[in-house]
Amino acid sequence: MICVVYLAACASPQKESAEVSDSEDSATTADAPRSTRHKPTEDENGLTYDIDSSLEPQELTIFGKTEAVSYWISKFYSQDHRINSKIDTLGAPGYLIKSVEMTEREYSDVKGQCVSRPVLLILRDIIMSGEEYYDIHFLTNDQGVSSEKVTYDGSIAQSTGSVSLSADFKLTKKCPTLAIIREYEGGDIDFGRMKEISFFVVSDAGMESVFDLVREYTLAKEYEVTGDENKNSTSEVRDFEILKTKTNDFFDIKVHATNKKDGEIVEEKETIFRFDGEKYSDKLAN
């Protein structure tokens, strides 16, 4: 059976915050919505992660400080309590940092002003299970480098997943909005596909999502038997258009949804989403 639970879980990222001081080697965590405050300790068998050898010679410059990738990773991940370092009694690392991508540019804040914000996209692999996760760190420089993190599923079991960042969309006139784009598909007997996009604006602590959209959800039962994605299938595809009209200085968004069953269109509808000052909503009047 297809791992529908994994595909569905991708729409609900985990979010947490951490703060590290450049004046000390130790790291401490700040308040986190899905975690408890704790002071990390190094396990007697070593750190709970390893870094891919291709990353070792690379450097990152964050808020004017240039250090090796391994230095910054140790700041952001020694406190990653969601990975249990004791699952391997032989002391092997719990997960592997596979890739690190950093972008820094100006993005819109909730008032439509342009604010520079560095963003890290990190792919890590749980060594014992082979599950992948994408961590996106929104970095601020407040008495040391602070990281507010959201996590999305990558490739898990029979489903493959990818996460990417884009600055190709503008919700305000002055500067782009950070878009996080996710795609997932897979299955053995059944087949599923999900495509999602979220728009983030700058906040004091990092960045906040203002619009989330599942652009496609498709499920084809017994796909391995029939070989036809349109047979025994249901799907909903949502296309969106950023309009020229504005609400609270943010462009309105029109979403066109098409529902299909066995490849045939059964329903179509359009919805206008408007910015209420904090998030986009389809409840606001014209």
Image: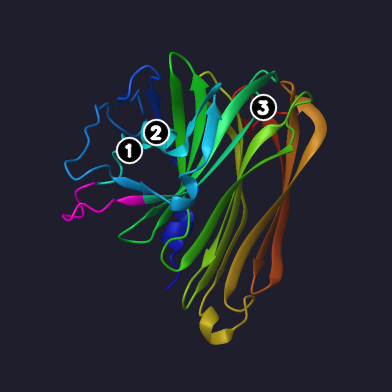
Frontmost residue, 228 versus 256: 228
| Residue farthest toward the bottom in the current orientation of the protein | 225
* Mark 2 residue element: helix
Asked if the residue under mark 2 is in contact with the one under mark 3, i.e. CB atoms within 8 Å, the reply is no
Q: Amino acid at mark 3?
A: Tyr
Frontmost residue, 37 versus 228: 37
In this rendering, would 133 be left or right of 278? left
**How far apart are labels 3 and 2 at the CA level?**
23 Å
Asked if the residue under mark 1 is in contact with the one under mark 2, i.e. CB atoms within 8 Å, the reply is yes
**How far apart are labels 2 and 1 at the CA level?**
8 Å
Q: Earlier in the sequence, mark 3 or mark 2?
A: 2
Residue 229: percent from left, percent from top: 62, 76
Say above or below: 23 vs 9.
above
Residue 110: percent from left, percent from top: 63, 21
Say above or below: 10 vs 222.
above
Q: Amino acid at mark 1?
A: Asp
Label placed on residue 80: 1
Label placed on residue 107: 3
Q: Residue at x 78, y 26 (%)?
A: 246
Label placed on residue 76: 2
Which quadrant of the view contains residue 76?
Answer: top left
- Whether the magenta-drawn stretch holds residue 91 is answered as yes
| Residue numbers of the magenta segment | 85-95
Label 1 Cα crowd, 10 Å radius (few <14 / some 14-19 / many 20+): some
Which quadrant of the view contains residue 252?
Answer: top right
Q: Residue at x 22, y 36 (%)?
A: 42
Residue 160: percent from left, percent from top: 51, 63
Q: Amino acid at mark 2?
A: Phe
Q: Residue at x 68, y 32 (%)?
A: 177
- Can you see residue 282? no
* Mark 3 residue element: strand
How is the protein colored in the picture? Answer: rainbow
